[in-house]
Amino acid sequence: MTIRHLKIFIAVAENGKMSLAAKKLYLTQPTVSQAIRELEEHYETRLFDRLSRRLYITEPGQHLLKMAKAAVHSFDELERQMQSETKTEHFRIGVTVTIGSCMLPALLSDFQRLRPQVDTFSFIGNTQAVEDKLLRSDLDVGIVEGVVKSPDLISLPLVEDYLVLACGAGHPFACRSTFSPSDLEGLDFVMRENGSGTRALFESYLRENQISIRRRIEAPFPEAMKHAILFNSCLAVISVRLIEEEIRKGTIHMLQDPENIWDRTFKLVYHKDKFISESIQLLRELLSQYQKPEIPIPIRSY
């Protein structure tokens, strides 16, 4: 049985005649009669007594009428809410921890200024977490710095970035201007968690140069990494965007990778079957406006 059958049944019960119900529903009387007959055959009971060209609802009919009204009301409410829902665009953005810390607030502000009618939601995790959510359709689009592995995802490099070797002002490396891979052998590091694009890039560098370090602290958040640099004498490989303020203040010293192997891009990622909405297009345009970060110049006091 369908909602249409129930609506016809309710109209007949309330009007007492099939002709009146047909007129109210803009249907033919045979159509209404057939719907009532199908209901009675389906439930194997009489829903109406036919007396003197009028219909009188039976006890089973009364029982069905009560439940039919509740079912139709629930269906109409579902229709109303879903129609209202589809008038509001919901845009789900997933970003990595680095991007969430240094770019997301300004990016969302610009996006919401240009498309205030869109209801946005943001998820912050590592590259692997964002990729998994895109594949499950829990997100519409992602912005990541790591390598996306699934062939079902399209990855568009849009924003230039680079990693640096960071240390506290009191670390022996603070007096250096450069380093070689072998200089890192056996030193203490704070590292991102597994699944992080930053960690994957640095670990690839270590493997290629056959370097072994001591992973003293594993931290999923930039602030925790900064604390390990400042207070635990750890080195870190981290996006320059995340420590610009500390570099200018002189509390953190940075060394650039002399071979530029740590240069990378932030990528816009979405499923290959995803409809490219105006929101996705706008996000791409906004990301394209971001420039490669300049080397922060420390503020010197005299």
Image (cartoon, rainbow, N blue to C red):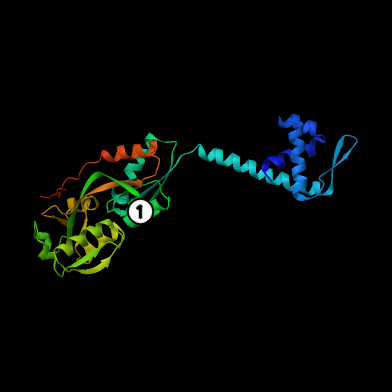
Q: Is 176 located above or below residue 105 in the figure?
A: below
* Residue found at x 72% / y 32%: 25
Which image quadrant is residue 255 in?
bottom left
- Please say whether residue 144 is visible from this viewpoint: yes
Q: Which amino acid does label 1 sit on?
A: Glu
Say what secondary structure mark 1 lies in: helix
Q: Is 157 located above or below residue 26 in the figure?
A: below
Residue 56 x, y percent position in the rendering: 86, 41
Q: Is 90 located above or below residue 217 in the figure?
A: above
Which image quadrant is residue 105 in?
top left
Residue 63 x, y percent position in the rendering: 79, 49
Q: In this view, does 114 lie to the left or right of 167?
A: right
Q: Which residue lies furthest to the right in this view?
A: 52
Residue 151 x, y percent position in the rendering: 32, 51
Q: Which of the pair 247/197 is nearer the observer?
A: 197
Which image quadrant is residue 235 in?
bottom left
For disc 1, the marked residue is 131
Q: Which of the pair 21/142 is nearer the observer?
A: 21
Residue 243 x, y percent position in the rendering: 22, 53
Q: In this view, does 99 lie to the left or right of 115?
A: left
Q: Which of the pair 70/23 is nearer the observer?
A: 23
